[in-house]
Image: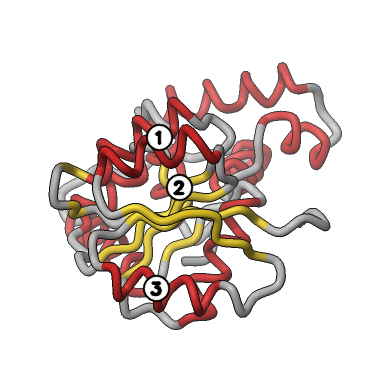
Amino acid sequence: MTDSPVRVVLIDDHQLFRKGLRLLLEQTPTIKVIGEAGTVAAAVALALETQPDVIVADIHLPDGDGIVAAEQMKRDCPRASIIFLSSDSDFRLVRRALDAGGRGYLLKDAAPQDIVRAIEAAEKGDVYLCPEVAAALVKDYQQRDGTAAPPPRLSEREREVLRLVANGLRNKEVAARLDVSVKSVETYRRRLMNKLGYTSTAELVRHALREGLIAP
């Protein structure tokens, strides 16, 4: 965390919920809520105008899909991290949210400290899932394990790179942590993608979660 507070915008169509969440977050000195919106159109315009550090967004908005809106906001605000806050724990929505670049997924009845932790984790480039959401993903993988072939065996270095990547570290940060070149990290990431048959970082995160390399 830096000395400056994390600048956050809230996207939810229920004004009362937004106000309550804002009051909660503003009790944390390291977080500053700089705007609110209740529709996709207003959210995209607000994100472009304010360039926040973190966007906390609902998935179901009255004029469209919050995940699609998040993808647009991410294009307009490439430095922003996105956390999804929803009443729906369906693992298919969780997977879509992570595939869209989400750095967190929490249910609306999450404990206040979990929301704060998610924002702080997203600002650092980490991924945060509330326990119920993590359990839904694990259950999905366990159901698949009955018919799926065991995953390829990874070397210790590959497992370490996977763990760091799944925790949200960027290539440069992974390289510094392991005392290797950025090019080496890029090679390891490509090797992991090819070996595991994945095409996105979100899939690597889910694999690391299933293998117990990162905490839910």
Q: Quadrant of residue 211?
A: bottom left
**Position of residue 15 measured from the top left corner of the image (x, y, whole percent):** 29, 68
Residue type at tag 1: Met
**Position of residue 108 measured from the top left corner of the image (x, y, whole percent):** 31, 73
In this picture, is 50 found above or below 140? above
- CA distance separating discs 3 and 1: 22 Å
**Position of residue 9 measured from the top left corner of the image (x, y, whole percent):** 48, 53
In the visual, does 28 lie left or right of 215? right
At 64% across and 64% down in the image, what residue appears?
31
Tag 3 and tag 1, C-beta contact below 8 Å = no
Residue 85 tag number: none
Q: Residues within 10 Å of mark 3 (few under 14, many from 20)?
A: few
Tag 2 and tag 1, C-beta contact below 8 Å = yes
Residue 19 tag number: 3
**Disc nearer the start of the sequence (2/1):** 1
For numbered disc 3, what is the local secondary structure? helix
Residue, disc 1? 73
Report if residue 210 is visible in the image: no
Residue 82 tag number: 2
- CA distance separating discs 3 and 2: 19 Å
Closer to the eye: label 3 or 2 = 3
Front one among 196 and 70:
70
In the visual, does 175 lie left or right of 117? right
Closer to the eye: label 3 or 1 = 3
**Disc nearer the start of the sequence (3/2):** 3
